[in-house]
Image (spheres, grey):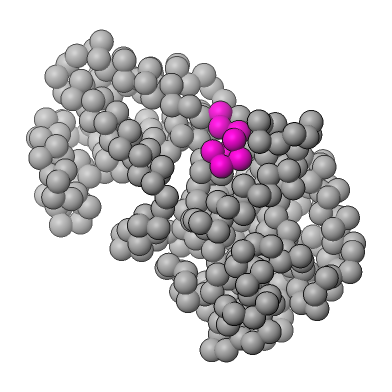
Amino acid sequence: MRFADIIGNASVAKMLSSMADSGRVAHAMLLYENEGSGALALALAYVQYLNCSNPSGGDSCGECPSCRQISKLIHPDMHFVFPVNKGPKASDDKPTSESYLKYWRELAVSDPYFTEADLQRAIGIEGKSGLIAVAEAKSIISKLSLASVTDGYKSVIFYLPEKMNQETANRLLKLVEEPPAKTVFLFITHAPEKVLQTIFSRCQSVRVMPLSKDEAAQVAALKPAHDKEDEAVFMDLFSDLLRAIVSRDLMSTLECGEAMAALDSREKQKAFCTFAASCIRKIFMLQQNMRQISDVEEHESDFYSEMASKCPKGFCMKTIINIDKVVSMIDRNVNSKIVFCDLVNRMFLNI
Ligand SMILES: [Zn+2]
């Protein structure tokens, strides 16, 4: 991946290439983003630039042997750590990122803007929590203790360090603080407040900005078909729910709550919440007579206009607050049936 291929965040790309040009490469960086904003793409482009044998104009060439290996994620000095769990795609009893590397590569090469739910689906651990266990730290320590295969930088791209436990962090601390020469750690987080302070404080942190509407549309166009299928399912569910609520049909409302709880992983349930919040925002914008910035498209205009006229003032704000609470409860493993039943009930009462 070249910086030129990245959608959005041009200033972050510029900062990374300037850092590489100056020779003052930070040995540990933490890129924090709202999921899907391109932090992984930036990290990959940065590692490619650091190792390119023929860089020009602040970007890698994309053609030298190193660039080719990095673009396929098979460079021998590039390592990946990401949250895993036991699953049918790994034969090991205690799987690590290495056990799922093939699936990680396929996913990240085809869609570097993937979400945590995409990763879970790709490695076959949907419905389970991904964790970064101590075995992962041992593996990285041993890999970095070897001489680099090429003459360039060794890199560790560490996806979601917030999923790492204390023991793993303790093992890694010294290495993150004083890595071997020409070694970079790139941590990518969606929840910087949950990254253990001992790791956080050793990193230079960089904010990766959310994508604009146009940029997000460009990313969406790159997405594989299954993401669009998810969106269609979410839209059906959301519209069934709102129609049940505005027609005061409690039975159907509760059934929608059950269908939301039955989405097959916590990540998918959270993705639904993000989707529902964006739909509620559209209704709110129409109610405020701000159609031009509402993101409502032509083909969905009838539905949103109808809902904007039928939902009372205050409904949207209350619902967005309630959806936020649902996301944090899902993160804390609260029973999803209870959480979604409570959400649809509150929406029903607020109408
Ligand atoms: Zn190159």
Residue 233, position as x, y percentages in the image: 33, 33
| Image quadrant occupied by the C terminus | top left
Residue 221 vertical placement versus 123 (above, below):
below
Residue 243 vertical placement versus 195 (above, below):
above
Q: How many marks?
A: 0
Q: Is residue 212 visible?
A: no
Tell me what residue is drawn at x 42 percent, y 50 percent: 224
Tell me what residue is drawn at x 29 percent, y 28 percent: 237
Residue 47, position as x, y percentages in the image: 65, 71
| Image quadrant occupied by the N terminus | bottom right
| Snapshot quadrant of residue 300 | top left
Tell me what residue is drawn at x 64 percent, y 81 percent: 64
Check if residue 47 falls in the magenta segment: no
- Left or right of residue 290, residue 236 in this image: right
Depth check, front residue: 90 or 208: 90
Q: Is residue 100 visible?
A: yes
Residue 232, position as x, y percentages in the image: 30, 37
- Part of the protein shown in magenta: 120-127
- Left or right of residue 246, residue 218 in this image: right
- Left or right of residue 28, residue 337 in this image: left
Residue 122 vertical placement versus 311 (above, below):
below
Depth check, front residue: 323 or 186: 186
Considering every residue shown, the one lying at the far top of the view is 251
Residue 257, position as x, y percentages in the image: 35, 20
| Snapshot quadrant of residue 79 | bottom right
Tell me what residue is drawn at x 54 percent, y 22 percent: 334
